[in-house]
Image (spheres, coloured by chain):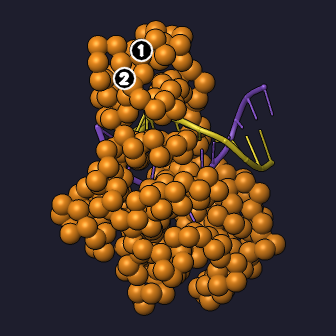
Chain colours: A orange, B yellow, C purple
Amino acid sequence: MSDLHEPILRWYDEHARDLPWRRPDASAWSVMVSEFMLQQTPVARVLPVHEQWLERWPTPAALAAESSGEAVRAWGRLGYPRRALRLHAAATAIVEEHGGQVPASYDDLLALPGVGDYTAAAIASFAHGRRHVVLDTNVRRVFARAIAGVEFPAPSVTKAEREVARGLLPEDEATAATWSVAVMELGALVCTAAGPRCDACPIADQCAWRAAGRPAYDGPPRKVQAWAGTDRQCRGRLLGVLRDSDGPVHRSRLDAAWSDEAQRVRCLASLVDDGLVARVGPETYALP
DNA sequence: CAACCGTGGAA
DNA sequence: TTTCCAAGGTT
């Protein structure tokens, strides 16, 4: 197998986007906030919110000093607002258990709320220059194509996949971190899920999928989430009412936001249960 | 481990 | 218009 590192690292050097959390002066906290926001949310929508967050809460301590409701409100319409709650809880844990400094070790990071394998590896790598296998949807897709010769990876990370990624990870710490972000960037900009630009790919002549004639995906059906009429939509609608209001809101305002009463009641209860909504009176609700 | 958790832009 | 999906995590 010819070497993938040089062409990908060189491509990244020439084509990497200038993102705030990638700048040399970016703090570990800036990287951490970006990783939370980027979970299932495109870069373009994260950029303005990330800037507002870092301006308002430049450190974990600054965020931890606020109520969780302020975090939820400032999360805006990024989606999956439980991430805001978890980021707030993670900031609190960092203050209480790590002296206010974002941990550098994978295990310490993984113990934080809202931090899973990917995010722990990403923060350790991108904020602290540690050497970890970073497996996100982009990296998985690039390796699925270049190495395995298939259009898309399996629904969940496999052992074989992790071994491939481990085997390709450069030995040098700093190079390993750059390698990971470079492969991610390649997946985000060139080796995209739909309409990959193989003509612009630095490893096109080494890609197993392209060599095989870009065969169509042949695995189990990929899950597509329903939306209309789901609890997710209902919860989003209810939370939106609270987010767009300055103070507590009467239940009638929420009633007006969703017609199906049984579903509305169930979703409101689940929002309260999640800590995204607080019941502040017999008939009034607010952000926590 | 499959299901659940938001949102909006592109194709 | 409908479908797809974007730097996942939790239960």
Label placed on residue A251: 1
Say which of A156 and A126 sits in front: A126
Rendered location of residue A188, percent (x, y): 64, 64
Q: Quadrant of residue A127?
A: bottom left
In the image, which disc is placed on residue A58? none
Residue type at mark 2: give it. Tyr
> Which residue is rendered at x = 39% and y = 25% of the image?
A248
Q: Quadrant of residue A196?
A: bottom right
Tell me where residue A44 appears, x and y as whole percent.
64, 56
Q: Amino acid at mark 1?
A: Arg
Same-subunit check for callouts 1 and 2 = yes
**Image coordinates for residue A279, horizontal then vertical, percent:** 30, 23
> Please, what secondary structure does the residue beneath circle 1 have?
helix
Point out residue A166 in the picture as x, y percentages from the top left corner: 43, 76
Residue in the picture at 69% in, 60% down: A192
Q: Say if A129 sits above or below A273 in the image.
A: below
